[in-house]
Image: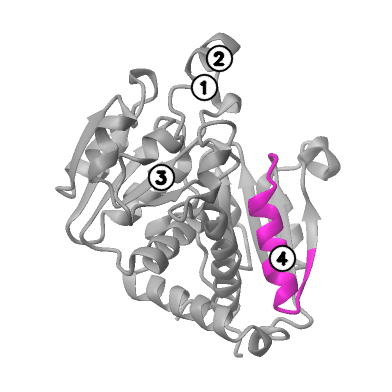
Amino acid sequence: MLKGKHLLEPMDFTLEETDEIFATADDIIDNPKKYAHVADGMLMATLFYEPSTRTRLSFEAAMLRLGGQVIGFSEPGSSSVSKGESIADTTKTIGCYADIAVMRHPKEGAPRVAAMNSTIPVINAGDGGHQHPTQTLTDLMTIRTYKGRLENLTVGLCGDLMFGRTVHSLIKALSRYSNIKIVLISPKELVIPEYVRKEVLIKNNIEFKEVRKLEDALPELDVLYMTRVQRERFFNEEDYIRLKDSYILDGAKMKLAKDDMIIMHPLPRVNEIAVEVDDDPRARYFDQMKIGMYVRMALVVKLLGLEA
């Protein structure tokens, strides 16, 4: 039973609970009218301490499509945070008004502090370079939808593997499924953090390898997960400019890939996927965004214990 739980990192839910979320999301996709009023009279608070388009709007769309309403802020300057209010006090205040809270914060661990001080379920919508569990649920369901399974897959993760919280979360989640092979594709300056390598890949005996060239990895992949090099995570502009175009997936490179490989991306993209690839039937990153809304709808339904 997921009612009243927090979602702070991908491993907070068992595989059975994760499947429960996916089954509910499938049902919402098939029967949207059945869920159109399940959250009538309920409020979601969105606490976004750093910019977001897709995550914030998908959460808001999810709650509104369930019949609920949304309050909150999209930047800390428009809240009492600008006056120095602590996360604990903000969370306690929000708990007086809303039924569920969604938080994005630049500091790792901030949503956990919120959850410790909350009387309502808290969902982590991204904390620094750490975790992004609802994106991970979205990614898993996208793979499940278009590959038909979450086992026996070779998954390539390409781009900024050092700062990419979506990558760290996805690797952690995939480690629970059998016969997963991970291919890490990045410049040497943006390799996967040592704690992910040791505590997730090596500890769980996940087969993995690191390559520098995307072309070398493409022929063996079932899933390619592209990421952007994130300007906001760099300490200086020179390093960002030097590394930002390390990998660009275009039509020519796609000829090296399997006919049934799928391309994913947490978005926003800058120029790491050429626009020409959008028309390739293997491109699933915009489908991925839509699936994300349904996953978040399912998550709200389960955490609030709503019945359709």
Closer to the N terminus: mark 3 or mark 1?
3
Label 1 packing within 10 angstroms: few (<14), some (14-19), many (20+): some
Mark 4 element type: helix
Q: Position of residue 288 (x, y in %)?
A: 52, 58
**Residue picked out by circle 2:** 241
Quick check: 185 left or right of 177? right
Task: Reply yes or no: does residue 170 show up in magenta.
Answer: no
Mark 3 element type: strand
Q: What range is drawn magenta here? A: 50-70
Quick check: 3 left or right of 202? right
**Residue picked out by circle 1:** 244
Gap in angstroms between the C-alphas marked 4 and 1: 31 Å
> Residue type at mark 1?
Lys
Task: Reply yes or no: does residue 53 show up in magenta.
Answer: yes
**Residue picked out by circle 4:** 61
- In percent of the image, x 45 and y 49: which residue is there? 264
Q: State the image quarter where residue 115 is shown.
A: bottom right
- In percent of the image, x 61 and y 65: which residue is there? 293
Q: Position of residue 19 (x, y in %)?
A: 38, 75
Q: Position of residue 171 (x, y in %)?
A: 33, 48
Closer to the N terminus: mark 3 or mark 4?
4
